Image (tube, rainbow, N blue to C red):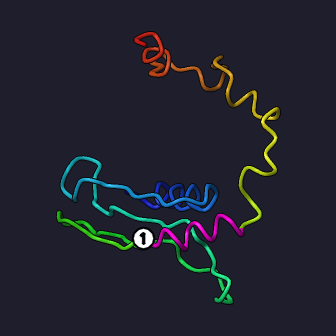
């Protein structure tokens, strides 16, 4: 895991108000450096004046079994109180994101999605 991927995971946990756990091979494997993570998706609590770090676990580079406690009742309470969510979605605006056509600049010779769809 590198800093940009970790930022993406943190953002997805924040945006979707859900916990995200990742598992990565330890350092020494090609393109791997450990740092399995758990983000809980709760950026602030009503009783705390500032934002909080959603990162509950950063496992480091060595192999092992890592345990972290995830407070699901806190996450559920956050989701019930937060203004975001699907109450104000506008699905009609997402048609470009859900379209099956792949247009430049995103055309790729190896399109895994088409291959997977054809197998179904």
Residue 67 falls in image quadrant:
bottom left
Task: Identify the residue at image location x=49%, y=15%.
Answer: 114
Prevalent SS, magenta region: helix
Residue located farthest toward the top when viewing the structure as drawn: 118
Which percent across, then down, holds residue 33? 28, 59
Dot 1 alpha-carbon crowd within 10 angstroms: few under 14, some 14 to 19, many 20 or more:
few
Task: Identify the residue at image location x=72%, y=67%.
Answer: 82
Quadrant placement of the N terminus: bottom left
Camera-side residue of 11 and 76: 76
Which percent across, then down, holds residue 12? 57, 55
Task: Identify the residue at image location x=24%, y=66%.
Answer: 61
Q: Point out the stretch of residues depicted in magenta.
A: 71-81
Q: Which residue is mark 1?
A: 70
Horizontally, residue 56 falls left or right of residue 59, namely right
Q: Is residue 14 positioned above or below 103 on the image? A: below
Horizontally, residue 22 falls left or right of residue 97, namely left
Q: Is residue 22 positioned above or below 99 on the image? A: below
Q: Assess whether residue 43 is covered by the magenta stretch.
A: no
Which percent across, then down, holds residue 98? 67, 27
């Amino acid at each position: 895991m590198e800093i940009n991927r970790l930022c993406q995971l943190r953002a997805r946990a924040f945006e979707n108000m859900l916990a995200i756990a990742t598992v990565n091979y330890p350092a020494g494997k090609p393109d791997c450096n450990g740092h399995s993570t758990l983000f809980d998706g709760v950026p602030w609590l009503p009783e705390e004046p500032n934002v909080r770090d959603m990162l509950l676990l950063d496992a480091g580079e060595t192999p092992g079994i890592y345990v972290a406690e995830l407070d699901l009742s806190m996450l559920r309470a956050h989701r019930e109180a937060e203004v975001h969510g699907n109450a104000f979605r506008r699905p009609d605006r997402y048609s470009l994101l859900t379209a099956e056509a792949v247009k430049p600049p995103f055309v790729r010779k190896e399109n895994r999605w088409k291959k997977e769809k054809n197998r179904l």
